[in-house]
Amino acid sequence: MFLSISTLFAAHAPYPTNWKSFQKVNTDLAKIGSLPDCKADVSGLSPAFQETVKMFCGAKEGGPGRVEILVNDITEFIERDVSYKDGTTFILHLVDLKLLLVTYYESGRILYATYNEDGTFVKAKKKTGLNPRDCKRCHTFYDNVCSFGQCGTHGKFK
Ligand code: HEC
C-alpha cells in the first residue's frame, strides 16, 4: 500500500536495480560515443543535440565523456510508441561520470531521474540537464527528434 502510494506521487523515476542487465543499443549519440566539452563545434548538429551538448558539456573538465544507451526491452525501443509498459524503459548511461539518466513509465505517464550507478538519487539543480524538469522540458520540446517523452532518431521516428 505504502509502496503504491509513494510511487504514484513520486515526481521522478525509481532506481532500476537491474540496469546492468539492460541491452546496449545504437543511436546517433551512441555512435558518436561521447559528449564533448564546451569548446566543440556543434553548429552542424540539430538544435536538440546542440542544446544537449551545451547543457552537459560543463559537467566535468574535458566534457562529460562516454555515453551508452541501455534499454530494458528492445522491442519497445524499436517501436517507440505511446504504449510503453510500466517500468524503466531506457537509460542514458554517462559512463565516465558514473550516472544513470533514467526514463520510467507509469500508466502512460513518463517520469525521469538521475542516479549514481550505486542507486543514490542525484538531487541536481535546474538547468544542469540532470534535474527531472530539465529532462522533461527537453524531451518534450524537440518534437522533431523526441516523441512521447523519448528522444533519439532510431526506429520509426528517424
Ligand atoms: C537539452 C536536452 C536534453 C536534456 C536536458 C536531457 N536529454 Fe535525454 N536525450 C536528449 C537527446 C537529443 C537524446 C537522443 C540521443 C540519441 O540517443 O541519439 C536523449 C536521449 C536520452 C535517452 C536515451 C533513449 C533515447 O530516447 O534515445 C534517455 C534514457 C534520456 N535521454 C534520459 C534523460 C534524462 C533522464 C534526463 C534528465 C536527467 C535527460 N535525458 C535530459 C536530450 C536531452
Image (cartoon, grey):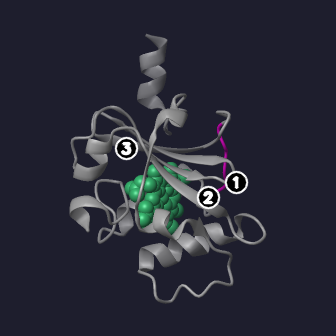
Residue under pointer 3: 110
Q: Please state which amino acid type lies under the numbered disc 1.
A: Leu
Q: Main secondary structure of the magenta part?
A: loop
Q: Give the CA distance from mark 1 to mark 3.
A: 24 Å
Q: Is residue 89 magenta?
A: no
User: Which is more N-terminal, label 3 or label 1?
Assistant: 1
The x and y percentages for residue 151 are 37, 60
**Who is closer to the viewer here, 6 or 58?**
58
Quarter of image, res 53:
bottom right
Quadrant (top left, top right, bottom left, bottom right) of the N terminus? top left
Residue 41 shown left or right of residue 48 in the figure: right
Q: Which residues fall within the magenta stretch?
A: 121-125
Asked whether mark 3 lies closer than 8 Å to ligand 1, one says no
Q: Nearer the viewer, mark 1 or mark 3?
A: 1
- Residue 126 shows which numbered tag? 2
Q: Which residue is mark 1?
A: 97
- Point 25% across, 59% down: residue: 155
Can residue 80 be seen here? no
Residue appearing at x 26%, y 68% in the figure: 158
Residue 118 occupies quadrant: top right
Q: Residue furthest right?
A: 61
Where 52 falls versus 46 (above or below)?
Answer: above
As measured in the structure, the alpha-carbon distance from the residue carrying label 2 to the one carrying label 1 is 18 Å
In the rendered image, which quarter is residue 153 located in?
A: bottom left
Using the image, determine if residue 104 lies above or below residue 129.
Answer: above
Q: Characterize the local packing of mark 1: few (<14), some (14-19) or many (20 or more) Cα atoms within 10 angstroms.
A: some
